[in-house]
Amino acid sequence: MQQLSTNKIHRVLITGVAQNLEFIFNEKQKADKVLERCFKANKQWGKRDRAFIANATYEIVRWYRKHCNSLELDYTTTRTTKECYALIDLYLIYRNELDYLKIFTKDEYKKLQKRNVEAEKNIALQQSYPDWIAQSGIAERELIALNKPATLVVRVNTLKTNNKQVENILSAENIKFEKVVNSHFTALNNAYVLPTRPNIFGSEMFKNGLIEVQDAGSQMIAQYLDVSEGMRVIDACAGAGGKTLYIAALMHNKGKIISMDTEAHKLEELQKRAKRNSVTIVETRIIDSSKAIKRLHNTADRLLLDVPCSGLGVLRRNPDAKWKLTPEFITEIRAVQQHILSNYTAMLKVGGVAVYATCSLLPQENEMQVQEFLLNNINYELVRENYILPTMGFDGFYMAAIQRVKE
């Protein structure tokens, strides 16, 4: 195999991708954070350059094991700079942006193609997953769907605007949009797909709180709570508050939402977002001890438990997680989920409903957790449960509505 030929791709962009890959594969840094830092350090890059860097980085990470197999590399070890360039070569060849004869001899490329044919017999190699994920019970069609690029979905903030106004602004800015029309998402009246993936965070619409970036499945979880005006709602694993903001809109800013998390910086971000969205009914509380939960026992009409999880349902937007997750982590996170489900549900009033949710597709994080909880807690009943699957066109989620029926 010869040295990289960048063909028409500017050398500095290739170097940028190679550096990103080293940070991701060798230092286990998150791909989105690596790209964010890369772009901040290279503000001179234009829109097309940034798109090339992002697409190349994500696609190589997404198909990492398959590419490593083609190049006879062990995907479980760290990568040299030379190997990172070889991965970029292969990416460019598969995109017809680089002539394979500039990198490989004909015999080398024939052997590579033969390895690719053999890989088609193994779903883990074919779809580029660690063996344990490929053998986890997730349906093959979902593994395939998780390898597609993530969809950009925005939600219209009905506290400040309406669909028509947002459609007019999008049209005026020549941004293509599609209403979310899907038999599984019929209730999402304010959700739009932006197929060209514009930099929406830099838009005046976003800065003024007219829209929020939120996947369709995530919006469905907020709707699953079935809230109404005047309710007292607790979002107990709120993070930066994406679902809190939508819940407030569904309640027409009437009632009370207590948003909780163990990390103060996330709640600070939630407060900033709430202000931008004109959400006025949210109070944030840090979970710094069990007392924070006990103070709220028997107070909630609705309780959202969007628990920490493996994130296997959102691999389309976080493909690097494939190479960081382990079976041991699943065991550890299940214990965290069990603790939250067992202890936080006491915040519900009798008659109140909790929604337990994950962005995982593993039964052991989802329905098995709910079944075990109900077996050990006879004062609660399952109302309904649902999966949002990647084959539906968006991220993967699980949600279960659980009602407290007795004291």
Image (tube, rainbow, N blue to C red):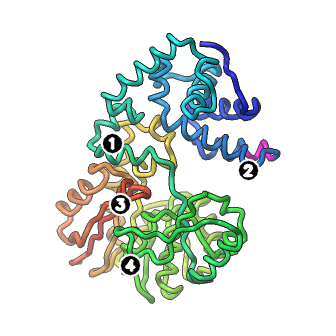
Camera-near label (2 vs 1) is 2
Camera-near label (1 vs 3) is 3
**Figure check: 368 above or below 38:** below
Q: Which mark is residue 331?
A: 1
The stretch drawn in magenta includes residue 208: no
Camera-near label (2 vs 4) is 2
Camera-near label (4 vs 3) is 3
Q: Which mark is residue 47?
A: 2
Q: Amino acid at mark 4?
A: Ala
Q: Main secondary structure of the magenta part?
A: helix
What span is in magenta? 39-43
**What is the distance, in whole Å, between disc 2 and disc 4 at their CAs?**
47 Å
**What is the distance, in whole Å, between disc 1 and disc 3 at their CAs?**
23 Å
Say which element carries label 2. Answer: helix
**Figure check: 253 above or below 144:** below
Q: Quarter of the image containing the C terminus? A: bottom left
* Mark found first going from the N terminus, 4 or 1: 4
Q: Which mark is residue 300?
A: 4
Residue in the foreground of this view, choosing between 279 and 182: 182
